[in-house]
Image (cartoon, rainbow, N blue to C red):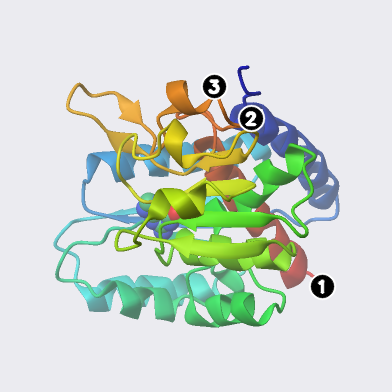
Amino acid sequence: MTASIINGKEVSQELRASMTAEVKRLSEQGVVPGLAVVLVGEDPASQVYVRNKEKACHDLGFYSEVHRLDASTSQADLLALVDKLNKQESINGILVQLPLPGHIEEKAVIDAIAVEKDVDGFHPVNVGNLVIGDDSLLPCTPAGVIELIKRTGIEMSGKHAVVIGRSNIVGKPVSLLLQRENATVTMCHSRTANMKEITRQADILVVAIGRANFVDAEYVKPGAVVIDVGMNRLDNGKLAGDVDFESVKEVSGPITPVPGGVGPMTITMLMQNTLIAAKRAHG
Ligand code: GUN
C-alpha cells in the first residue's frame, strides 16, 4: 500500500489565502503588518531565503524592509540596526538571517531583538515561554510541522511521537509542541542506541537529523505519520530529505515529501507570526 502524501505547498497556500483576507480587513483599519529582514553577507542559500520572504510579504500585502549589509559589517553596527528596528512602529517582526559571518556572535544579536518582534521565536524569553506553555511567538518550522500533522486529521493526544534530532531550531521545540498536543514524546539523536527499536514504536515520527535519506522503511511502524524536516543538498545538486521517501512511503501512513512538505510551511508560519505580532501591537 502506498501512503498518502502530505502536500505542504497546498496547506501553505490555504493558510496564506486566509491570511491575505485578514490582512485586507486589518489594512482597512489602518493596520499593515510589517516585517524587517536583515541579511549580512552574500551566502547564496540565504539570499534565496531572503528573496522568498520578501516575495511572501508582497503577495500577502505586508509592509517589508530588507536590509542587505556587507559581510564586513561590525557587530556594533548590526546591533544598532536591530535597536532601530525594535523602535520602529511600522515594523512588527524582525528576522536576522542566520548564519551570520564568524566575527558576529549570533546569540548577542538574537538577544537584542525585542521579544514581541522576535518572529523567529529564537529569543530566550520566547523559548522559555514555549517551555512553560505560555503565549509566545513559536519557532516557524516546528509550528509548521504541528500544523501539517493536524491537517492529516490524526489525533496527537495519547499517541507516541518520536523526534529524531535535538537542535534548538527544530528537534527541541517540536518535542515541546508535541507534548502540548498531549502526545507522549521520545527524543532520539545521533548518539541514541538501538534507534530503530525506538522509532518503530512511533505513531508519529518527526525526522530532523540532517542526514540525507537516514530513515528507511525499517525505522517506521506501518501506518505511522512521517514528517521529514531534512533539507540536504546532494553532490548531484538535488535536494534530499532525511527520510528515504520511496521506501518509507510503502509502509508509512501520511508522509511529507522533500521538497514540497515542511519547507513551504516555514515562511508561511513566519508570516503568521508577523500577523500575530501586528495584531498584538495594535491591541
Ligand atoms: N536560516 C535558515 N533558516 C532560518 C530561519 O528559520 N531563521 C533565520 N533567522 N535564519 C535562518
Give the image location of residue 260, x and y in percent: 52, 28
Q: Dividing the picture into quarters, in which one does residue 178 lie?
A: bottom right
Badge 1 density bin: few <14, some 14–19, many ≥20, Cα 10 Å: few
- For the residues carrying marks 1 and 3, which lies nearer the camera in this image? 3
Which one is earlier in the sequence, the residue at label 2 or at label 1? 2
Q: Do tag 2 and tag 1 residues touch (Cβ < 8 Å)?
A: no
Between the C-alphas of marks 2 and 1, the distance is 36 Å
Q: Quadrant of ligand 1?
A: bottom left
Q: Please indicate whether residue 254 sits to the left or right of residue 85 in the image.
A: right
Give the image location of residue 104, x and y in percent: 21, 72
> Badge 3 is on which residue?
250
Q: Amino acid at mark 1?
A: Gly
Residue in view at x 63 percent, y 17 percent: 1
Q: Is residue 65 visible?
A: no
Residue in view at x 61 percent, y 34 percent: 222
Regarding mark 2 in the picture, which secondary structure is present there? loop
Quarter of the rendering occupied by the C terminus: bottom right
Q: Please indicate whether residue 148 sits to the left or right of residue 39 in the image.
A: right
> Badge 1 is on which residue?
283
> Badge 2 is on which residue?
6
- For the residues carrying marks 2 and 1, which lies nearer the camera in this image? 2
Q: Please indicate whether residue 86 sits to the left or right of residue 188 in the image.
A: right
Regarding mark 1 in the picture, which secondary structure is present there? loop
